[in-house]
């Protein structure tokens, strides 16, 4: 779980650093492939893939808003909030697991 939370945090950092979100999707694909190759549980693999597909669609929607517009910045902020919520959920899930 710690590795997955770290990977999600890396996605969050990539979104923060990428002004136009160009580098987020390649990083996302790389991290998903890395997580899946290490994971043995099929249920968790499917959840990882589902999460990456949701993020992929959200990134496409945000980029449609047009870079450097106020609407783009608002959508990017909502995307960051979503990823932050996933990190919090992962943290909560880990505490519940222990």
Image (cartoon, helix red, strand yellow):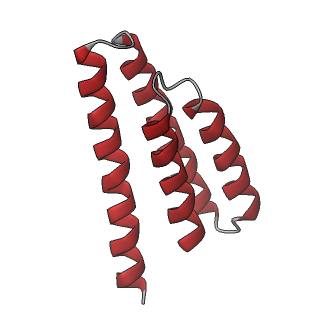
Give the camera-side residue of 3 and 22. Answer: 22
Q: Classify the position of the N terminus by image quarter.
A: bottom right
Relative placement, left or right, of 76 versus 51 is left
> In the figure, 25 relative to 4: above or below?
above
Q: Which residue shows up at 71% across the image and 68% down it?
A: 40
45 horizontally vs 86: left or right: right
Query: Does residue 35 sit above or below 32 in this rendering?
Result: below
Depth check, front residue: 15 or 57 = 15
Callout count: 0
Residue sitting at 64 percent across and 61 percent down? 42
Residue at left offset 45%, top offset 25%:
19
Residue 1 visible, this angle:
no
Residue 92 locus on image (x, y percent): 33, 74
Q: Quadrant of the C terminus?
A: bottom left
Can you name the residue that lies furthest to the right here? 37
Residue at x 31% of width, y 19% of height:
72
Q: Residue furthest bottom?
A: 98
Q: Position of residue 44 (x, y in %)?
A: 56, 62
x, y (%) of residue 6?
Answer: 54, 63
- In-image side of 82 versus 63 (left or right): left
Q: How far from the left and from the top, in percent, is residue 58? A: 40, 29
């Amino acid at each position: 779980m710690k590795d997955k939370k770290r990977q999600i945090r890396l996605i969050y950092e990539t979104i923060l650093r990428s002004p136009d979100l160009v580098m987020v999707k390649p990083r996302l694909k790389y991290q998903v492939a890395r997580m899946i190759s290490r994971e043995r549980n099929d249920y968790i693999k499917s959840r990882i893939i589902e999460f990456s597909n949701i993020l992929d669609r959200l990134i496409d929607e945000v980029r449609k808003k047009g870079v450097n517009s106020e609407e783009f910045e608002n959508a990017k902020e909502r995307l960051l909030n979503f990823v932050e919520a996933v990190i919090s959920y992962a943290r909560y899930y880990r505490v519940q697991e222990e």
